Image (cartoon, rainbow, N blue to C red):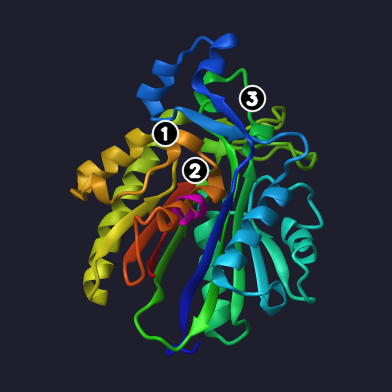
């Protein structure tokens, strides 16, 4: 690894389906209301993909915007990583389709599955490709159409999720103390049964311990996931604060996985981090899994919530169970 190579953020982009689904629409088929959903989650609405919108088409849109912001032609990309749990096909990967659609030369491209932490995992992989000299410019994408794996008769889960995509371009640089400063990634498969989609993509030939095989939709133990998320988010934040101090910088903005406002508030209470330095957009998009953090990062930059030289911390947690953080100086 070349320790003198920085991995800098050159551009961001995001894409969202046209259709907006507000909380009131659930009341037609479920015993719920806008007030019930808002007070328990902080979500007011989410985007739902139309039949012609896919995790590939959304990824293409977000990627083109990121490349435009980076002022980088697609033929200069050396690698594409797409984080998703809702690929269009088992194979080829979403990333393969992206490589062709963007007009790239033949380069490596692959999907990465780590649920809601997938985008952070992908940043870590891209960083290592760049620092070991295997790539100079990497496109990292998070793209999901979770509405297609949601049971809309399950009030506890269907209200949480939405569709969308976010993308970033990472590049090699010799400028010190900028870009990806530190990453921390974790997983614990003992909690795999807490969030799972058992049988949507491929048929099981036999039972998987702790996971029912009959449902085709996402299943989640909300109470246990809430406890896990609060604990891990507070833990990641506390470590990030210490890491920033060691790096001689300050966390100007926290960009967490957009899952539930109560989870974010509980973690802030435990760490004492100020709420006005947290990027939150879940009220408009809900939980978009691997797309959540890159959409929020793109909006934070485009809305002027953060500026060149600022250090932002990305944190996420999700099925697997997985969790992680990235410290990034713009």
- Please tell me which residue is depicted at 39% across the width and 24% down the height of the picture: 38
Residues shaded magenta: 294-298
Along the line of sight, the residue nearer the viewer: 299 or 250? 299
Q: CA distance from mark 1 to mark 3?
A: 19 Å
| Residue 191's disc number | 2
Residue that sits furthest to the left in the current view:
272
Q: Does 168 appear above or below 113?
A: below
Q: Is residue 257 magenta?
A: no
Q: Does 268 appear above or below 199?
A: below
Which class describes the residues within 10 Å of circle 1: few (<14), some (14-19), or many (20+)? Answer: few
User: Considering the image in quadrants, where does the C terminus appear?
Assistant: bottom left
What secondary structure is found at the residue carrying circle 3?
A: loop
What secondary structure is found at the residue carrying circle 1?
A: helix
Q: Does 227 appear above or below 298?
A: above
| Residue 224's disc number | 1
Give the mark, 3 or 2, whose residue is nearer the N terminus: 3
Q: Which residue is mark 3?
A: 151
Whether the residues at callouts 3 and 2 have beta carbons within 8 Å, the answer is no
Whether the residues at callouts 1 and 2 have beta carbons within 8 Å, the answer is yes
User: How many numbered circles are shown?
Assistant: 3
Q: CA distance from mark 1 to mark 2?
A: 9 Å
| Residue 38's disc number | none
Q: Is residue 143 visible?
A: yes
Mark toward the viewer: 1 or 3: 3
Pinpoint residue 256: horizontal percent, then vertical percent.
39, 50
Mark toward the viewer: 3 or 2: 3
Main secondary structure found in the magenta portion: helix
């Amino acid at each position: 690894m070349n320790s003198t190579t920085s991995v800098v953020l050159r551009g961001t982009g995001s894409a969202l389906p046209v259709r907006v689904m507000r909380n009131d629409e659930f009341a037609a088929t479920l015993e719920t209301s806008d007030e019930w959903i808002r007070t328990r989650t902080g979500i007011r609405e989410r985007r739902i993909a139309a039949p012609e919108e896919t995790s590939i088409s959304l990824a293409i849109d977000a990627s083109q915007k990121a490349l435009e912001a980076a002022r980088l032609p697609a033929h200069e990309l050396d690698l594409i990583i797409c984080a998703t749990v809702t690929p269009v096909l088992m194979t080829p990967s979403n990333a393969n389709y992206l490589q062709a659609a963007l007009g790239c030369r033949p380069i490596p491209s692959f999907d990465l599955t780590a649920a809601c932490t997938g985008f952070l995992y992908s940043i870590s992989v891209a960083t290592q490709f760049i620092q070991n000299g295997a790539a100079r410019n990497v496109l990292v994408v998070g793209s999901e159409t979770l509405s297609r794996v949601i049971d809309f008769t399950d009030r506890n889960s269907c209200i949480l999720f939405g569709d969308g995509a976010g993308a970033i371009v990472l590049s090699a640089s010799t400028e010190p103390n900028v870009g990806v400063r530190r990453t921390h990634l974790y997983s614990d498969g003992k909690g795999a049964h807490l969030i799972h989609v058992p049988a949507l993509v491929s048929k099981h030939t036999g039972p998987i311990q702790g996971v029912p095989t009959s449902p085709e939709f996402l299943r989640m133990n909300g109470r246990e996931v809430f406890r896990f998320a609060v604990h891990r988010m507070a833990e990641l934040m506390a470590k990030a604060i210490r890491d920033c101090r060691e790096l001689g910088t300050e966390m100007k903005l926290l960009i967490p996985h957009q899952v539930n406002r109560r989870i974010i508030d509980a973690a802030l209470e435990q760490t004492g981090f100020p709420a006005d330095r947290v990027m939150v957009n879940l009220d408009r998009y809900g939980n978009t899994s691997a797309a959540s953090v890159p959409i929020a990062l793109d909006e934070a930059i485009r809305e002027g919530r953060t500026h060149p030289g600022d250090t932002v911390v990305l944190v996420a947690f999700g099925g697997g169970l997985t969790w992680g953080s990235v410290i990034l100086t713009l």
